[in-house]
């Protein structure tokens, strides 16, 4: 991927000139939308055209409260990819910049956007803004929590639509966002790869946007595992090397699969041992009959002991893998009792959740189903 930085600023006094641009903001009605729109000057008559795409499901929703002159479209809850497509297709400008509804463009953002786009050659299809994630407690020296670190990782991510401008011709050449991506995950990386495959390059601009950290609750890291389904689609569309193509890092899915397998094996072996003991105590003759049918030469007690031992080994493997995962999340954080408890509980749930969502994604890719 191209890793250029746009240095198109002229150094001259700012004027409201440059390529015409439309700002598209998909939203699910977050309160933060108001700050996003205010930061781009929506409704004041001196900023770019703004289109808000209401992606809340249902037809009986109350109208969004937006400034005057802001156009509002509805996409029916079909996800951010479909919402962004509705927005850029309704625009008529040569450039479209996508913002998320939980970011706050910095002071002078409109001017910086204009300068970022002003002298880009025709082969440049997109320009990404700089993203800054202010971390709560950093001024006091508090280390970030697991959730805060996940959000902070967005600052170094390439081509994410928290603040990403695309040339209209690039969007038309690729068809826009792939609406098979159901959530706000990987749909932006997929588009960037397809834009580059269409012959355009992507650059980094100088405009600055801030992404505040949200508190999404105790189970947010578990819900985040839904993105594993989108990873299956990325592999299907872009091949096994898609992570390297977007500048990403290897995930933990293989370890999650090993952890989940060890846990399931421990439960299966322990259940088999308990079932055998129960039948032996019941005097049904099941153990004797089963031994004869299988031709086993081991006495029942020795065989039961081996089952129990194998269950114990698998259980210890699951415990060790789970403990390693939990500590990897706890160690860089504040290590408060609340954070440790959250990491302990969610580290048990995340591996099977990740595997289940990946399997769901693989089935969806192979059957053509959306969910």
Image (cartoon, helix red, strand yellow):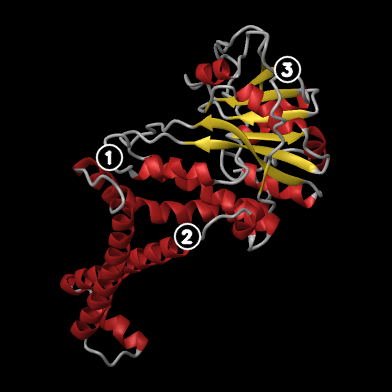
- Closer to the camera, 195 or 274? 195
Q: CA distance from mark 2 to mark 3?
A: 49 Å
Helix, strand or loop under label 3? loop
Residue labelled with disc 2: 253
Helix, strand or loop under label 1? loop
For residue 239, side relative to residue 340 (left or right): right
Q: Residue at x 23, y 46 (%)?
A: 341
In the displayed image of the protein, which residue is found farthest to the left? 281
User: Horizontal and vertical percent for residue 337?
Assistant: 19, 43
Answer with the quarter of the image where residue 290 lies: bottom left
Q: Which of disc 1 and disc 3 is earlier in sequence?
A: 3
Is the C-beta separation of discs 2 and 1 under 8 Å? no
Numbered label attached to residue 16: 3
The C terminus lies in quadrant? top right
Q: Is residue 265 above or below residue 6?
A: below
Q: Residue at x 61, y 60 (%)?
A: 244
User: Horizontal and vertical percent for residue 40?
Assistant: 60, 19
The N terminus lies in quadrant? bottom right
- Closer to the camera, 194 or 279? 194
Numbered label attached to residue 281: none
User: Mark 2, mark 1: which one is toward the viewer?
Assistant: 1
Residues packed near mark 2 inside 10 Å, few (<14), some (14 to 19) or many (20 plus)? some
Q: Is residue 47 visible in the rendered structure shown here?
A: yes
């Amino acid at each position: 991927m191209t890793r250029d930085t746009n240095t198109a600023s002229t150094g001259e006094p700012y004027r409201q000139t440059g390529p015409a641009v439309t700002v598209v903001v998909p939203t699910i009605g977050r309160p933060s939308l108001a700050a996003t729109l205010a930061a781009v000057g929506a409704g004041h008559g001196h900023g770019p055209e703004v289109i808000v795409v209401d992606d809340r499901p249902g037809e009986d929703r109350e109208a969004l409260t937006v400034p005057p002159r802001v156009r509002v479209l509805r996409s029916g809850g079909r996800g951010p990819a479909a919402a962004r497509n509705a927005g850029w297709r309704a625009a008529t400008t040569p450039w479209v910049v996508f913002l998320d509804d939980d970011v706050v463009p910095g002071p002078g953002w409109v001017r910086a956007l204009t300068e970022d786009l002003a002298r880009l050659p025709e082969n440049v299809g997109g320009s990404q803004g700089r993203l800054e994630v202010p971390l709560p407690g950093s001024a006091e020296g508090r280390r970030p929590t697991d959730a805060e670190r996940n959000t902070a990782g967005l600052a170094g991510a390439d081509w994410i639509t928290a603040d990403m401008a695309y040339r209209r011709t690039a969007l038309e050449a690729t068809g826009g966002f792939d609406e098979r991506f159901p959530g706000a995950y990987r749909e932006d990386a997929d588009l960037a790869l397809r834009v580059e495959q269409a012959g355009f390059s992507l650059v980094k601009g100088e405009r600055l946007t801030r992404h505040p950290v949200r508190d999404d609750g105790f189970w947010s890291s578990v819900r985040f595992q839904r993105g594993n389904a989108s990873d299956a689609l990325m592999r299907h569309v872009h091949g096994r090397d898609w992570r390297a193509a977007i500048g990403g890092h290897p995930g933990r899915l293989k370890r999650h699969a090993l952890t989940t397998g060890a846990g399931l094996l421990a439960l299966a072996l322990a259940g088999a041992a308990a079932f055998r003991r129960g039948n032996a105590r019941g005097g049904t003759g099941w153990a004797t009959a089963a031994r004869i049918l299988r031709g086993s030469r081991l006495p029942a007690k020795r065989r039961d002991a081996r089952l129990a031992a194998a269950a114990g080994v698998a259980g210890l493997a699951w415990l060790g893998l789970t403990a390693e995962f939990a500590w990897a999340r706890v160690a860089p954080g504040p290590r408060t009792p609340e954070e440790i408890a959250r990491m302990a509980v969610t580290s048990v749930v995340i591996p099977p959740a990740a595997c289940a969502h990946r399997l769901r994604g693989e089935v969806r890719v192979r059957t053509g189903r959306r969910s």
